[in-house]
RNA sequence: GGCGCUGUGGCGGAAUGGUAGACGCUACGCACUUAAAAUGCGUUGGGGGUAACCCCGUGUGGGUUCAAGUCCCACCAGCGCCACCA
């Protein structure tokens, strides 16, 4: 009587057994001191925000990392594979506002829910190292790290613009402002308001963060490119202009060679020198322009497009290279927070400056003359940013002009430096990181404001600064922390005077910028971590997560790592050795192409030929990001209930390469379930006929045995290859299918080779489908876990073949194949090929000019005519 | 505007410069069944031929090579990131 594959039964059973046995507990470096030192492997998935339910994207992310962790365990590494919760953030506050549930309660309930869902996936986490960023045990050390930045002078306050909701009188996060610039809650047009904010000085690390991207060969190129773009280094020179009144205005330019063509200057409306430069006559106009610019939010500023606006200050500056007197304007196309907030305008060679000059009738001076043309400032219709020869440029006249580090730029920098008028330098687009949030559910910034001592850090012994849990959240007014007198009022740690706590909390990106450093020593109550343990486990060997974190999270984590290295806390400078950015999981939608509306799948009568039940129009089937409004979400719970976790895991790995988007298709899931059923029948049928699976293969094998053994060892070789380095889980799974097919077709079911095949299949399958592999492994009669078995190693002997297939080509076209002895040399191959019917057929009457022989592959005849 | 990535059957996708389409899904046919489901077997890029075989085919156009899905150049389409960045 054959048993049935019932994933629900065996999955629950084995999850319990593994938990009881502590199968997934991490092995520390000193755990097996008597044995040979084992290599460490740190496998990490980006930890989730506990929103309440698991979605398919999570399943994909964690399954990938789990397979990697399991393979490394079987290969003998000691593996760290932890999980935790990125638990601070807005949704908890929203839940509190909407439903009156305390953020902490809501968050911990969600964590419990998601943890139990995660456990049903059979992920091999060491749950004893779980971290939760909203727990005082964790954020105490977040605060401690903040103080390290503070001590190092890298945490500072300055005025910065925030999104201000004038109706609710509250600060909004960028995500709370819709595309039209309105508050998500009140619907009011969001204003910009200057408030004192905390920053981390990430710009100090701009150059290192850029340079060290080269140290990351295991990262996807595009992620590195995105980071490089974000850091945005440009090289050029800094030049100081002096006004008639003697004030200095410094500008940054990437084209110092065009200095001789600067005909005016433009300052950002917020530039501190503007009031001083403004003449009495211009005061009104300037003030009006500044006010208009300040009121504009980012949306308006970009929506305005190309139209150039600006006002003359009434003052002039002297161009340091030629002594010319040029007017100083203000305009909002010059940004205060890039470069110096001021530019020299070279309208002949910069399109923006050109447009500005034409709008306001300012002079245009050509200093780069392209070959074969004579540009004239009067008649120019667009700026010439290209190459040419320097003209009207005094000392650098006649030098070829190019972009970037071209000759003219180098010459100009050399001249500037020699005459003390400027110097070559680099500028970065990267800004300092604004980390303060005027919100409740976050890590409190551990600072006290004393009327006498000023800003005083909370002493280490007083950490953590606990986030009070008894608060009312309304979504209106300031953060509840600013109302909570019992919490707010403290005595100054330095002088004892009455003082007040800082009420801002930290950006949640801070919490996630160091969590990977906590896992190696997650329960340390005395230290942020034991450096020995962190230095042992770090860096993360394989990090897996969504591409949406390509810039911020990964950049911030790199910044933290470099900073902590500089503080002497750790001995490495990059946190993530290898990075895999997995693609999205998309759901199937039925979309009416005319109306753009989505139809509920249950209303589609014939899925093969979908029509709109209302209009009868044909629907198109498109895969898009899962969402309620598209009726295309698939809940992991439902899939596990129906097919089991093993099917879900296998399907997700097989359906697409990990970095590509994956189309969730029920029919394919069925197919995957069928495969596991085939394996089940294959192995259970085997255990009924074959008693001893442990026999060693005999010395001489029959042909079918040899063929099967080759299939087995090819599967080992290919699967191992697909799991090494560039993870190709989809082809690895297909290798498992091939091996299963080979065993199904094999005739030598009584041979020890067949038993070897069955065992190998289970071992190779264990990381992918851990439950069914374990169950069948035990059905073979073993009592130890399949997950504790060694990863199989391909036997080169088994891969040896007697005969190989050689391709016959004529003029590069394949004309047939021949079987030849495996050891045949070049000459023999050519001889066999000449005699082959395919060659005979196509060579008849032709003159052979050349024969290309690629041993093991092909013979190609090159003929005349 | 700048910088990148991707284009392969009905579909998802395989192919160290060397037999394009592995593996799977779908569809069709057959077997088993009273029937269905499940399962098993077969076919499944296009065209021609009874067959052996032949011709065409990896977004488009060129090139390199004995040989190109793969390398180079140009273009087209889709996607991503950055963007009044001096």
Image (spheres, coloured by chain):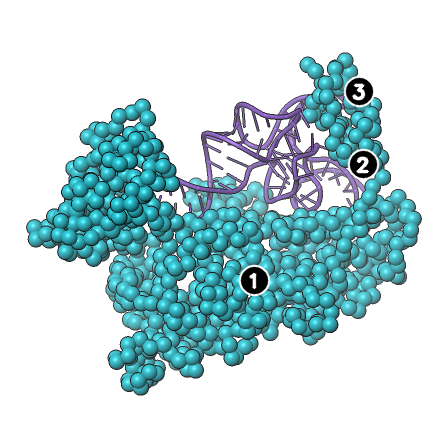
Does label 1 or label 2 sit earlier along the sequence?
Answer: 1
Residue on which disc 2 sits: A804
Does label 2 or label 3 sit earlier along the sequence?
Answer: 2
Which chain identifier belongs to the purple chain?
Answer: B
Does label 1 or label 3 sit earlier along the sequence?
Answer: 1
Asked if one can make out residue A599 in the rendered structure from this viewpoint, the answer is no
Q: Is residue A813 above or below residue B81?
A: above
Instruction: Report helix, strand or loop for mark 2.
Output: strand
Q: Nearer the viewer, mark 1 or mark 2?
A: 1
Q: Residue at x 56, y 42 (%)?
A: A609
Of A91 and A594, the residue lying toward us? A91
Of A61 and A416, the residue lying toward us? A416
Residue on which disc 3 sits: A840
Quadrant of the image containing the N terminus of chain A: bottom right
Residue on which disc 1 sits: A539
Asked if labels 3 and 2 touch by Cβ distance under 8 angstroms, the answer is no
Could you tell whether A39 is left or right of A429 in the image?
right
Q: Nearer the viewer, mark 1 or mark 3?
A: 1
Quadrant of the image containing the C terminus of chain A: top right
Q: Is residue A256 above or below residue A71?
A: above
Chain A shade: cyan
Could you tell whether A118 is left or right of A862 in the image?
left
Which chain's residue wears label 2?
Answer: A
Q: Are marks 1 and 3 on the same chain?
A: yes
């Amino acid at each position: 009587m054959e048993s049935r594959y019932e994933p629900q039964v065996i999955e629950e059973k084995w999850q319990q057994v593994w938990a009881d046995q502590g199968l997934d507990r991490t092995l520390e470096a000193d755990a097996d001191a008597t044995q040979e030192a084992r290599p460490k492997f740190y496998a990490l998935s980006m930890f989730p925000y506990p929103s309440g339910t698991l979605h398919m994207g999570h399943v994909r992310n964690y399954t990938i990392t789990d397979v990697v962790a399991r393979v490394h365990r079987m290969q003998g590494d000691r593996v760290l594979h932890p999980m935790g919760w990125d638990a601070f953030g807005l949704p908890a506050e929203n839940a509190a506002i909407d439903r009156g549930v305390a953020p902490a309660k809501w968050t911990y309930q969600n964590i419990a829910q998601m943890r139990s869902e995660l456990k049903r996936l059979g992920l091999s986490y060491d749950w004893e190292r779980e971290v939760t960023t909203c727990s005082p045990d964790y954020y105490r050390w977040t605060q401690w790290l903040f103080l390290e930045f503070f001590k190092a002078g890298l945490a500072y306050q300055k005025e910065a613009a925030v999104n201000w909701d004038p109706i609710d009188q509250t600060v909004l996060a960028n995500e709370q402002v819709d595309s039209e610039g309105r508050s998500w809650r009140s619907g009011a047009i969001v204003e910009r308001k200057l408030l004192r904010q905390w920053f981390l000085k990430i710009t100090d690390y701009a150059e290192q963060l850029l340079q060290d991207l080269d140290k990351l060969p295991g990262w996807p190129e595009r992620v590195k490119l995105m980071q490089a773009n974000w850091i945005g280094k440009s090289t050029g020179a800094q030049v100081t202009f002096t006004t008639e009144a003697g004030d200095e205005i410094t500008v940054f330019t990437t084209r110092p060679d065009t200095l001789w063509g600067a005909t005016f200057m433009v300052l950002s409306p917020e530039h501190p020198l503007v009031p001083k430069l403004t003449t009495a006559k211009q005061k009104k106009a300037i003030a009006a322009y500044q006010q208009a610019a300040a009121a504009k939010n980012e949306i308006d500023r970009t929506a305005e497009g190309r139209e150039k606006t600006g006002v003359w200050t009434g003052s002039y500056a002297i161009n340091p290279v030629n002594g010319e007197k040029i007017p100083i304007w203000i305009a909002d196309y010059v940004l205060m927070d890039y470069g110096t907030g001021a530019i020299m305008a070279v309208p002949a060679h910069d399109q923006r400056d050109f447009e500005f000059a034409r709008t306001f009738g300012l002079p245009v001076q050509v200093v780069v003359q392209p070959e074969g043309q004579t540009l004239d400032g009067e008649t120019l219709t667009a700026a010439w940013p290209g190459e040419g020869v320097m003209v009207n440029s005094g000392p650098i006249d006649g030098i070829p002009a190019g972009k970037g580090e071209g000759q003219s730029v180098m010459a100009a920098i050399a001249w500037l430096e020699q005459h003390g008028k400027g110097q070559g330098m680099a500028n970065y687009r990267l800004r300092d990181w604004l980390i303060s949030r005027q919100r409740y559910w976050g890590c409190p910034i551990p600072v006290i404001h004393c009327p006498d001592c000023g800003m005083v850090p909370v002493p280490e012994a007083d950490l953590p600064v606990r986030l009070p849990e008894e608060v009312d959240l309304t979504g209106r007014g300031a953060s509840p922390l600013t109302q909570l007198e019992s919490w707010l009022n403290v005595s100054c740690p330095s002088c004892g005077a009455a003082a007040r706590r800082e009420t801002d909390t930290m950006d949640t990106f801070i919490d996630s910028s160091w969590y990977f450093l906590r896992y190696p020593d997650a329960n340390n109550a005395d230290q942020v971590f034991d450096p020995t343990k962190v230095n042992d486990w770090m860096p993360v060997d394989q990090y897996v997560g969504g591409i949406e974190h390509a810039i911020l999270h990964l950049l911030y984590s790199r910044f933290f790592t470099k900073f902590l290295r500089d503080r002497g806390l750790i001995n490495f400078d990059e946190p993530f050795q290898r990075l895999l950015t997995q693609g999205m999981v998309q759901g199937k939608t039925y979309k009416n192409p005319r109306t753009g509306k989505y139809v509920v799948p249950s209303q589609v009568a014939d899925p093969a030929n979908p029509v709109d039940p209302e209009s009868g129009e044909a629907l198109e089937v498109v895969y898009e990001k899962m969402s309620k409004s598209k009726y295309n979400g698939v809940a992991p719970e439902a899939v596990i209930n129906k097919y089991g976790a093993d099917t879900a895991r296998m399907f997700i790995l097989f359906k697409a390469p990990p970095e590509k988007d994956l189309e969730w298709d029920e029919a394919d899931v069925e197919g995957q379930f069928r495969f596991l059923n085939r394996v089940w029948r294959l192995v259970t049928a085997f255990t009924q006929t074959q008693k001893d699976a442990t026999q060693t293969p005999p010395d001489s094998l029959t042909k079918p045995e040899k063929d099967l053994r080759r299939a087995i060892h090819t599967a080992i070789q290919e699967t191992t290859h697909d799991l090494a380095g560039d993870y190709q889980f989809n082809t690895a799974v297909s290798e498992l299918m091939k091996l299963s097919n080979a065993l199904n077709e094999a005739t030598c079911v009584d041979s020890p080779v067949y038993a070897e095949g069955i065992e190998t299949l289970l071992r190779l399958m264990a990381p992918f489908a851990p439950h069914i592999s374990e169950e069948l492994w035990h059905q073979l009669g073993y009592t130890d876990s399949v997950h504790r078995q060694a990863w199989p190693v391909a036997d080169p002997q088994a891969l040896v073949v007697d005969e190989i297939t050689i391709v016959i080509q004529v003029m590069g076209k394949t004309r047939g194949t021949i079987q030849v002895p495996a050891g045949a040399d070049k000459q023999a191959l050519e001889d066999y090929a000449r005699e082959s019917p395919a060659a005979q057929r196509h060579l008849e009457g032709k003159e052979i000019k050349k024969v290309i022989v690629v041993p093991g592959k092909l013979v190609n005849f090159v003929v005349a005519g």
